[in-house]
Amino acid sequence: MRRSVGFFLILLMFVGAGTLFAGGGAEARRGPVTDIPGAPAPFDGSTGRQLHIAHLSYLQEGEFMQMYRAGVEQQAALLGMRVTVLGRHTDAQSQANAVSQAINLGVDGIVIQHGLTETMVGPAQEALDAGIPVVAFDVDLENPRIPQIAQNDPQHGRNAIEAIVSDFNGQVDMAYVRVAGILPLDKRDGPIQEVVARESGVRIVAQTGTLDSPISTQNAAQATAVLRANPNIRAYLAPYDEFAKGIVLALEEIGRDNVKVYSIDISTQDIEIMTQPNSPWVMTSAVNPSEMGAASVRALAQLMVGENVPQDILVEPMIFTSEMLVEAGVQNMEELMDAFPEFATSNAARSPWMPR
């Protein structure tokens, strides 16, 4: 009899525990709710759930892309949203397919980062047709309903080529890393070609470039051949920091110390290279990559609440020379933003209801 009573009590304990855990599970399944005090719907808690966005990437390699993604995730968290990242490095079809995945996930918004216009225009329209707002970073989706978030890429290109003109008094044979078909690189190229056409003494004597992985070492191999074939080259324009890392590798490989490297974008690894004694990497034009990711999410949030969002949202670049970085004692991105606070953030796509 005592054994039966004992068994019954144990059974009650399991039933009670099951009820308790079932209740806890239901609460866990409900999960967090996006609820920002004073925010408009759907950020005001009215959905009873956490808002969910997708980040569809095309370029993923390098510190810039990692920091961009971190900016997306940090800003989304600040706005009470979760992020799902989809796509594979330089895989256009994977990125296009990711739109359907995002639609099936029932996301509330989509950030499309880089990519090819021809493969993303149709899928982006499918997302809009499904009622999902879309923003694009550094890819032209040819749609007035999709805001374009970008660095001021023409100014980037102008900053880099004009630094070369100034440093060499308008007389230099240079090499140029050029990859066509990538929107920011195409935008950077326009002013570069304009200045070269204007400055008869500035000559592009060799042009290479690839986005094959690993980007820096693949470009180093190409640049090594160029530098060996053209001993007269004194400047190398690499309008993406992963390109510039490759050029520095190539210069080290062949022992050339008479070539200066000019680039666009910045990261901790870039700073480490630029601040080394006698570094060939003397200048870069840059914006904070994390801020570009954050601005993309803020623009998407503005669409989600029904605000009027400009077609083009630009963040202006700053020029950094190796001399500036050394004088400021900067060794990483955190120290760069401390030394140059205007670089850390921007007012791009900010609304008063958004928490800082």
Image: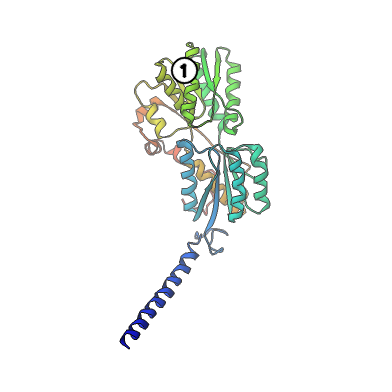
Residue shown at 49% from the left, 38% from the top? 65
Residue 147: image location, x then y, percent: 62, 43
- Residues 109 and 342: in front is 109
Residue 77: image location, x then y, percent: 47, 52
Total marks in image: 1
82 with respect to 257 (left or right): right
Q: Which quarter of the figure has residue 131? A: bottom right
Mark 1 residue element: helix
Q: Which amino acid does label 1 sit on?
A: Asp
Residue 4: image location, x then y, percent: 35, 85
Asked whether the viewer can see residue 349, the reply is no
Q: Mark 1 points at which residue?
A: 167
- Residues 222 and 128: in front is 222
* Rendered position, 234 above or below 264: above
318 with respect to 96 (left or right): left
Q: Which colour scheme is used?
A: rainbow
Q: Which residue extends farthest bottom?
A: 1
Residue shown at 54% from the left, 22% from the top? 208
- Residues 176 and 305: in front is 176
Residue shown at 47% from the left, 19% from the top? 224
Quarter of the image containing the N terminus? Answer: bottom left
Residue shown at 64% from the left, 50% from the top? 127
Residue 291: image location, x then y, percent: 48, 42
* Rendered position, 84 above or below 191: below
* Rendered position, 39 above or below 1: above
Within 10 Å of disc 1 (Cα), the crowding (few <14, some 14-19, many 20+) is: few
- Residues 131 and 327: in front is 131
Asked whether the viewer can see residue 154, the reply is yes
